[in-house]
Amino acid sequence: MSLIVTGTIGIDSIYTPQGHAEGVLGGSCTYFAAAASFYGPVRLVAAVGGDWPDSHRAVLERFANVDRTGLEVRPASKTFAWGGKYLGGMNSRETLYTELGVLAEPPPKVPDRFKDSRTVFLANTHPAVQLELLEQFPGRTLAVADTMDLWIKTAREPLGALLKKVDGLVLNFDEAELLTGRANTVSAARRLLDLGPRFVVVKKGEHGCIMAHRDGLAAMPAYPVEEVVDPTGAGDSFAGGLMGHLAAAAGNDIGSFETVRRALAHGTVAASFTIEAFSLDGLARLTREELDARFRTFAEMMRLR
């Protein structure tokens, strides 16, 4: 089933206790598409500026299943750029700078041949833009969105309108608390179901994730990685693995509780490779065989005898 992602492509500078990486490829759309591409074709819609390095394009081209027809290059503009520093155990980070670049401009156009997409992921951007993009896929079967604290604080009304039209929502635990006023993750996730989505996935970093679904509740631990190098993009890779599996499932009801619950495990495993290296290096050197082997290990770890 056709999968499409809309979001950001960025130029990142990252500092962690394990080292640093300057001017590397980043962005929500990028990590998502790379992870999802292991499960099947994924269509990408995003914009970059004339300063987007050829080396970044080369990295993205390594993921053969990513259709870049929707990648819009604006020569007179600047690419979105972000710098961040992770502290201590890398459970928290400090934003050093954010340069919006093309994000301050109108969103990229969806190519006509992409408008028949059935599975849609709206990666993090302004909810009004997400809503505008969502309406361009009238035949969608499943639509899932991501969001962040900035939009919860400054764009609550369009975010509320968006939640009424999507099937799923993916967000961090602190964002779930901010949006609902409930500190308990389970309570917050269940409250979010009242706002429209069929299921809500709350990410909790090294503590895994919790899903509240209209048909049940599920929890998934994180895959135990020995060395975390860079957590950037972990949440987007998680969403990519999750949505990639759902699109590949191609059943009549890919949003069912059991199907989404299994997809959580695929997202968890995809994210575990991302955090083992800076930028997309962990995913770029990954093979499908390695991904499947780790998934089998993860599934066995969770088995109750």
Image (cartoon, rainbow, N blue to C red):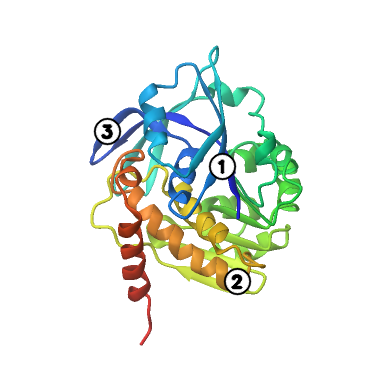
> Which one is in front, 263 or 127?
263
Judged by depth in the image, the label closer to the viewer, 2 or 1, is 1
Residue lying at 67% horizontally and 70% vertically, measured from the top left: 214
Labelled disc at residue 20: 3
Residue carrying label 1? 43
Residue lying at 31% horizontally and 69% vertically, measured from the top left: 297
Tell me if residue 51 comes above or below residue 188 in the rendering.
Answer: above
Q: Secondary structure at mark 1?
A: strand
Mark 2 surroundings within 10 Å by alpha-carbon count, few (fewer than 14), some (14 through 19), many (20 or more): many
Mark 1 surroundings within 10 Å by alpha-carbon count, few (fewer than 14), some (14 through 19), many (20 or more): many
Labelled disc at residue 257: 2
Mark 3–mark 1 Cα distance, whole angstroms, equals 30 Å
Could one spot residue 12 in this view of the protein? no
Residue lying at 51% horizontally and 60% vertically, measured from the top left: 245
- Quarter where residue 221 is shown: bottom left
Q: Which callout, 2 or 3, points at the residue further toward the start of the chain? A: 3
Q: Which callout, 2 or 1, points at the residue further toward the start of the chain? A: 1
Tell me if residue 290 comes above or below residue 214 in the rendering.
Answer: above
Extreme residue toward the bottom, this view: 305
Q: Secondary structure at mark 2?
A: helix
> Which one is in front, 227 or 286?
286
Residue lying at 54% horizontally and 24% vertically, measured from the top left: 100
**Amino acid at dot 2:** Phe
**Screen quadrant of the C terminus:** bottom left
Mark 2–mark 1 Cα distance, whole angstroms, equals 25 Å
**Screen quadrant of the N terminus:** bottom right
> Which one is in front, 113 or 297?
113
